[in-house]
Amino acid sequence: MLDNKRLTPLIALVGAIALMMSAPAAFAQTAATSSAAPAASSAAPAADSAAAPADSSASAAPAADANPPTTIKGAGKLTLVTMFGNATIVVKVVIVGLVLCSLLSWTILITKIFEFASLNRESDKFLESFRTAKSISDINRISASEEFEGNPLADMAAAASSEVELSRQAGLQVAGEHRDSTIVRVGSAVAAVQASLARRLSNGMQFLASVGSTGPFIGLFGTVYGIMNSFIGIANTNTTNLAVVAPGIAEALLATGIGLFAAIPSVVFYNYFQTRISAYGNRSEGFVAELMNAISRQLDKGA
């Protein structure tokens, strides 16, 4: 058996060893407890901050629903038909008027092209026959032929020869000392036919000139009115989004486009037909000189 002196230091050593072994576990438990407290305290703000955006998004949803996006009529599918259908009544009236003017202009253009082609062809044929005439009676017979009915040169020759025949039937002397008065009467009859020829060839030209000069301005009027409505729409919707104003501007510009479509062919063909009219006028002047010479020769011969 050990005595008390030796036992006491041994018990103290065992107690110290046990204390040392239990100290790290108590320290780890204390550290875990102390670290858990800040984590819990930091987790609370995080949870609060996470809840706050959720609340804000939840409150933003009704606000978005309260102001739905503006829907533009015809946006994304604009065509000529939809642009015309969505246009205001003033722009529609301008567009319809310009389309009608364009159709009438093209009708005049096609008619004039065929008229001048036929006119020159028939005139060439008449001149060949006219130059074979040997007397005033032959001139009257050729010009009165159904083959040349409606030809301006044939009408001039018919007027000249008919005047000579009417003077003879009236018992007037057409040759000799009365030759000059006969030539004056013949010239007056031919001049009347020339005046009717000028009116005939000028039919429709005034309309082409009017469409060519006023078409762009009429279309511009529709464009200005349409753009004014587009800016009024911007003010009413209180937005500068291009999708809001684009359809209205496109509809307005359609009026200018149609105005140019009507005006450009009218101006081009007006100048072209004026040249053709002037050329045929010079041809008719040359024929009048040839006709008067033929009549004068026949009168000098006493025919």
Image (cartoon, rainbow, N blue to C red):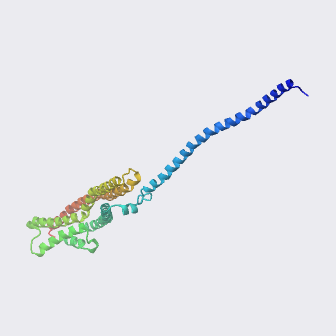
Q: Position of residue 257 (x, y in %)?
A: 35, 56
Name the one closer to the observer, 275 or 141. Answer: 275
Quarter of the view holding residue 141: bottom left
Q: Is residue 134 visible?
A: no
Q: Is residue 210 visible?
A: yes
Name the one closer to the observer, 292 or 112. Answer: 112
Name the one closer to the observer, 78 or 266. Answer: 78
Q: Position of residue 212 (x, y in %)?
A: 28, 57
Q: Position of residue 143 (x, y in %)?
A: 23, 71
* Residue at the farthest left position: 177
* Residue at the farthest top position: 5
Residue at the spot x=39%, y=54% of the render? 244
Quarter of the view holding residue 199: bottom left
Q: Position of residue 232 (x, y in %)?
A: 32, 54
Name the one closer to the observer, 112 or 189. Answer: 112
- The quadrant of the picture occupied by the N terminus is top right
- The quadrant of the picture occupied by the C terminus is bottom left
Q: Is residue 9 above or below residue 104?
A: above
Q: Is residue 257 above or below residue 137?
A: above
Residue at the spot x=72%, y=35% of the render? 26
Quarter of the view holding residue 201: bottom left
* Residue at the farthest right position: 1
Q: Is residue 151 left or right of residue 191?
A: right
Q: Is residue 207 left or right of residue 178?
A: right
